[in-house]
């Protein structure tokens, strides 16, 4: 009953903001990686664990992702690097396609940053930790929020250019990725109020509703933080900016396992939780409204919306044809608990008692929260070669 009530609430709210569904995503075709930069000589990336290439482990990883600095993370690429996957991420495949070196993390002080910097930090939020704490959300694993990352970017540009003219020239030949970020703001709000096994059903219902309301309140603030950061980099001289949306949260194994809803009517035809996906779409709709306003303000810049939601759903729908095992579409490759999702949020990948699947490339999910290297490669293809990042931030040659 609680799930149905929450679903009705989310549906009603989303109808108010005009989230009336999306067309089916296009089917991808395989392609080989082009070797061109399209005038891009550097990438600057802001974000969280979806694109962190080693900042979190250099901060001193804590919390549920503290094991990302060791195996089995990185097992597909010869060892752990701080990437939250078995191998490379979307940002790595994008850099490779542009003919650029893989992005080094900002906190690697011995790195060569000639061709860009990765400011993303696992666990990072769009809002600063103090703002979240005022709303009762206190689970942040890092203080490196989007605002902190943006300041590091400003400091870096100031220290590597001699004038605003030189800075603008440098940024005019760069690709700036503002996210994905914001998902953790919601993750922490939901997690703070997740059901507790030792409490009564009535208590847990109230707890879950509190989490839902807190998350809904966060959405406009999170979106504003993202678009404000994008505005600042555009003001500094960026001419090509990518702003990704949120994933379909209702399809993510960690959420599916935590909610563990038994009512079949709570799921859509893909096997995802309808209410959580509607929530994710609310974020995406408001974000796209903000992006449209940025395009009006900066008509000469290319400001792309990267549709992570549709890319992920496309992988689910076409799992078999994309090289995945369709029967494992909702299972974590690395985890504990078995069952439909193989996720235990108290025993994340790498913890005692967890196991790793034999064929990670056949799984969408690596650890129940993050994706496998194969999934990230497919998503990069869908986004940057098959039109799900629009307008195209990079003009790759036709194959």
Image: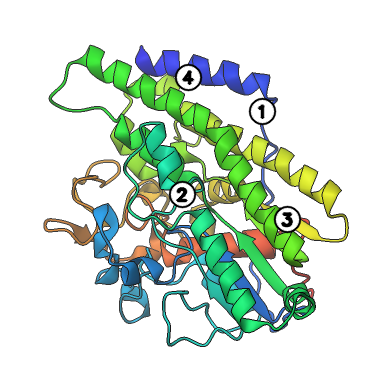
For label 1, the residue is: 19
Residue 351 in percent (x, y) is at 17, 58
Q: Nearer the viewer, mark 2 or mark 1?
A: 2
Of residue 360 and residue 19, the one placed in the foreground of this image is: 19
The C terminus sits in image quarter: bottom right
- Say few, some or many: other residues with alpha carbon within 10 Å of mark 2 (under 14 / 14 to 19 / 20 or more): many
Q: Report the Cα–Cα distance between label 2 and label 1.
A: 24 Å
- Give the mark, 2 or 1, whose residue is nearer the N terminus: 1
- Mark 4–mark 2 contact, CB under 8 Å? no
For label 2, the residue is: 125
Q: Quick check: 375 above or below 257? A: below
Residue 2 in percent (x, y) is at 36, 15
Q: Is residue 378 visible?
A: no
- Say few, some or many: other residues with alpha carbon within 10 Å of mark 4 (under 14 / 14 to 19 / 20 or more): some
- Give the mark, 3 or 1, whose residue is nearer the N terminus: 1
Q: Which residue does the image show at 42% across and 55% down from the upper left? A: 364
Q: Report the Cα–Cα distance between label 2 and label 3.
A: 21 Å
- Mark 4–mark 1 contact, CB under 8 Å? no
Q: Which residue does the image show at 75% across and 60% down from the upper left? A: 235
Of residue 82 and residue 323, the one placed in the foreground of this image is: 82
For label 3, the residue is: 304
Q: Nearer the viewer, mark 4 or mark 2?
A: 2
For label 4, the residue is: 7
Residue 377 in percent (x, y) is at 53, 66
Q: Can residue 233 be seen in this view?
A: yes
Q: Report the Cα–Cα distance between label 3 and label 1.
A: 20 Å
Colour pattern: rainbow
Q: Report the Cα–Cα distance between label 4 and label 1.
A: 14 Å
Q: Nearer the viewer, mark 3 or mark 4?
A: 3
């Amino acid at each position: 009953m609680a799930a149905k009530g929450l679903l009705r609430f989310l549906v009603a709210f989303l109808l108010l903001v005009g989230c009336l569904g999306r067309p089916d995503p296009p089917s991808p075709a395989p392609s080989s990686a082009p070797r061109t930069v399209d005038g891009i000589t550097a990438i600057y990336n802001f974000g969280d664990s979806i694109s962190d290439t080693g900042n979190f482990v250099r901060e001193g990883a804590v919390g549920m992702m503290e094991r990302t600095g060791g195996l089995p993370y990185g097992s597909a690429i010869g060892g752990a690097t701080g990437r939250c996957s078995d191998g490379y991420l979307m940002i790595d495949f994008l850099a490779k396609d542009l003919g650029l070196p893989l992005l080094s993390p900002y906190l690697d002080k011995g790195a060569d940053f000639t061709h860009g910097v990765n400011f993303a930090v696992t666990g990072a939020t769009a809002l600063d930790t103090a703002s979240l704490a005022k709303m009762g959300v206190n689970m942040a694993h890092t203080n490196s929020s989007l605002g902190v990352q943006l300041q590091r970017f400003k400091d870096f540009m100031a220290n590597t250019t001699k004038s605003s003219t030189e800075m603008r020239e440098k940024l005019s030949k760069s690709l700036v990725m503002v996210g994905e970020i914001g998902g953790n703001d919601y993750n922490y709000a939901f997690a703070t109020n997740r059901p507790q096994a030792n409490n009564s059903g009535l208590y847990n219902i109230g707890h879950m509703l509190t989490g839902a309301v807190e998350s809904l309140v966060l959405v406009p603030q999170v979106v504003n933080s993202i678009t404000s950061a994008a505005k600042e980099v555009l003001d500094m001289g960026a001419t090509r900016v990518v702003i990704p949306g949120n994933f379909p949260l209702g399809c993510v194994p960690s959420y599916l396992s935590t909610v563990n809803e038994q009512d079949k009517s709570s799921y859509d035809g893909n096997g995802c939780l309808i209410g959580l996906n509607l929530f994710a779409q609310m974020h995406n709709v408001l974000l796209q409204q903000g992006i449209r306003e940025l395009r009006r303000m900066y008509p000469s810049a290319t400001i792309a919306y990267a549709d992570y939601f549709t890319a992920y759903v496309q992988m689910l729908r076409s799992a078999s044809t994309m090289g995945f095992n369709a029967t494992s579409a909702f299972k974590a490759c690395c985890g504990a608990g078995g069952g439909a999702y193989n996720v235990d949020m108290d025993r994340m990948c790498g913890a005692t008692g967890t196991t790793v699947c034999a064929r990670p490339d056949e799984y969408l999910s690596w650890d129940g929260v993050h994706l496998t290297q194969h999934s990230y490669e497919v998503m990069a293809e869908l986004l940057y070669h098959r039109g799900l990042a629009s307008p195209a931030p990079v003009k790759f040659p036709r194959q």
